[in-house]
Amino acid sequence: MTVQTSLDTIRERALAELGTAADLATARDWERRFLGAKGELTAFLRGLGALPAEERPAAGRAANTLKQELSAAYAARETALAAADLDRRLAEDAVDVTLPGRQPAVGSTHPVTQMIAELSDIFALMGFQTVFGPEVETAHYNFDLLNIPSDHPARDVWDTFVLDTDEAEIVLRTHTSPMQARTMEQRQPPVRVVVPGRCYRYEAQDASHEWMFHQLEGLAVDERITMADLKGVLRELARQLFGPERRVRFRCDFFPFVEPGVDFAVDCAICGGKGCRVCKQTGWLEMGGAGMVHPKVLQGVGYDPERYTGFAFGLGVERMLMMRDGVGDVRAFAGNDLRFLRQFARAQV
Ligand code: PHE
């Protein structure tokens, strides 16, 4: 076989193989096999020494010519494949801007938060300012200033979480009433505030008892405030929340910090007072406790009970929602079940 023939077979094979290389990796492998340090053409050039001296220059030239041809062919092929590769990756990464976007999961305010906002708005129209107080309280505010001394059996009415400390007796507030005293200590009459917030009681939980729940306290103190003002305010609240037809009922009840004390109820909006499952056939739904601020409470914060009178009330916030929206179990509110909470979802403002 002549030198030219063997070069021709290498050429033929090399170009055919390069022509079928479909990607950059195959093309690079091809370059290694034919043009690399251990490639076929390099091996051929090394073998030239074995030829008779007069044949060497021609064979060397022919081999170099082939090497240039193959190198040029490789460069062209590599450029083409690299361009194709780039096109492919760009196509893969392409974003279809016409696709509809993914809906972000937007949260909503909690139903209790919504109810507190609604109650604040209703009371603001009647001149009440919304204020907030501490959830961790001293027994002094939670009990003593509310006319519940430590030896008074009424302390047992509230199943209290007591914090383990050597200092003053610290409790998780059992109601929002401590803010009555805190507010009166800080300002002079006329006072008109509502106090929404969490309360805690050491309770056995059931469908109507939670160890954590929300109240909204109300307090108005001024000269000549009477029970008629209390009734008017709570009646207006019931009408705003449950509809213009609603009637309210006041019955005697006992709370050490009011005298007289009442519990108040609204006639059931579901059955119009005839009696149904929601109102347990009574026709009435209990909203909370209320009464005229006890003279001892006024005295305790330095108000003159001869000059000032006032009323106070406490509403259960979850209870308002249960009545109005027909929620059967108070545990749903802190239960973190999104299927429940989504029913109260509203557009954010
Ligand atoms: N704090 C009382 C309770 O939690 C409710 C109440 C508030 C009663 C204000 C009278 C006046 O039971």
Image (spheres, grey):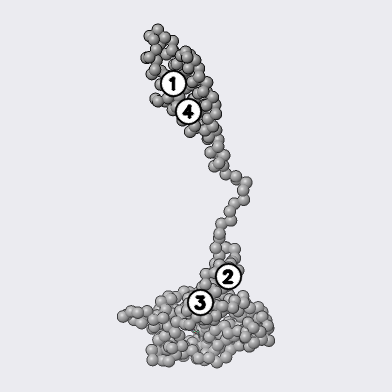
The residue located at (49%, 20%) in the rendering is 10
| Residue kind at label 1, given as amino acid type | Leu
Query: Alpha-carbon neighbours of circle 1 within 10 Å: few (<14), some, or many (≥20)?
Result: many
Residue on which disc 3 sits: 214
Please report whichever mark, 4 or 2, sits nearer to the chain's N-terminal start: 4
Q: Nearer the viewer, residue 91 or 176?
A: 91
**Circle 2 sits in a helix, a strand or a loop, which is it?**
helix
State which quarter of the image contains the C terminus: bottom right
Which residue bears the numbered disc 2? 340
Outermost front residue: 1
Location of residue 292 with respect to 80 vertically, above or below: below
* Image location (x, y in percent) of residue 12: 52, 21
Q: In this figure, which residue is indicated by the disc labeled 4? A: 30
Q: Amino acid at mark 4?
A: Trp
Q: Which residue is mark 1?
A: 41
Q: CA distance from mark 2 to mark 3?
A: 18 Å
Give the residue type at disc 2.
Phe
Q: Position of residue 175 (x, y in %)?
A: 47, 81
Res. 188 in view: no
